[in-house]
Amino acid sequence: MPSKFKNAEFESPKLKYLSAYSAQIQMQVQQMLEQKNLEKYLLNKYPTVHEVTNDKALRGYVMSLKNQYLKKSSPLSQIKYDDKIHIINNALGLHTYVSRVQGNKLKSKNEIRIGSLFKKAPEAFLAMIVVHELAHLKEKEHNKPFYKLCQSMLPDYHQLELDLRIYLTQVEMIGDIYT
């Protein structure tokens, strides 16, 4: 391998899920990892898992949030857990928007897929992912209006996103705690 491609360019940061956060937050999480306190932190804040464990229950959960906050948004044609999301897309959930030409009309479908890892996770994490994907019905980009919409549906959205990223760090580096 040519020397210009060695090491630094292909090494992922140790705390890849937290790379957008401040050095102070990364240092705190790193210390919790080293002291083996990350699991304790998460279980203290989120001791139980939700009961939305199949696609039918997920559809009901998503639709209740959609009807509460985004009644006039586009309909959802499919809502399901997906085993391949985390592996292929390095994502937690996906909102897909598919346009098809049918005759002289343009038909569109919206789908929400949630990574199967979240079948056994705290309800707060599921809510955060669902709110994130629902917000894409109105705002396609991750911009200021997008995050404002997320916060209007889930006031502690940003804290939940951080804790979810801490949980993903735990899963990747040590293992799942909600098995």
Image (tube, grey):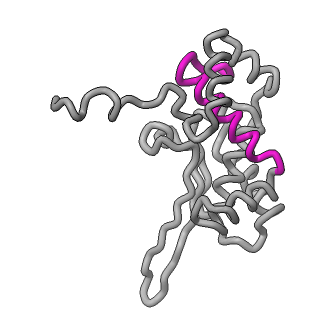
Q: Residue furthest top?
A: 35
Q: In which image quadrant can residue 49 be found?
A: top right
Residue 137 is a magenta residue: no
For the stretch drawn in magenta, the main secondary structure is helix
Q: Nearer the viewer, residue 146 or 47?
A: 146
Horizontal side of 145 relative to 114 (left or right) equals right
x 68%, y 23%: residue? 28
Residue at 58% from the left image edge and 24% from the top image edge: 171
Is 129 placed above or below 73 here? above
148 or 86, which lies in front?
148
Q: Residue at x 55, y 52 (%)?
A: 94
Image height of 72 relative to 116, above or below: below
Q: Position of residue 136 (x, y in %)?
A: 63, 62
Q: Nearer the viewer, residue 156 or 121?
A: 156
Q: Residue at x 62, y 16 (%)?
A: 33
Q: How many marks?
A: 0
Span highlighted in magenta in the image = 155-179
The quarter of the image holding the N terminus is top left
Residue 172: x percent and y percent? 53, 24
Measured as percent of width and height from the top left, residue 120 is found at 67, 30
Q: Position of residue 46 (x, y in %)?
A: 79, 27
- If the image is split into quadrants, where does the C terminus sit? top right
* The quadrant where residue 161 appears: top right
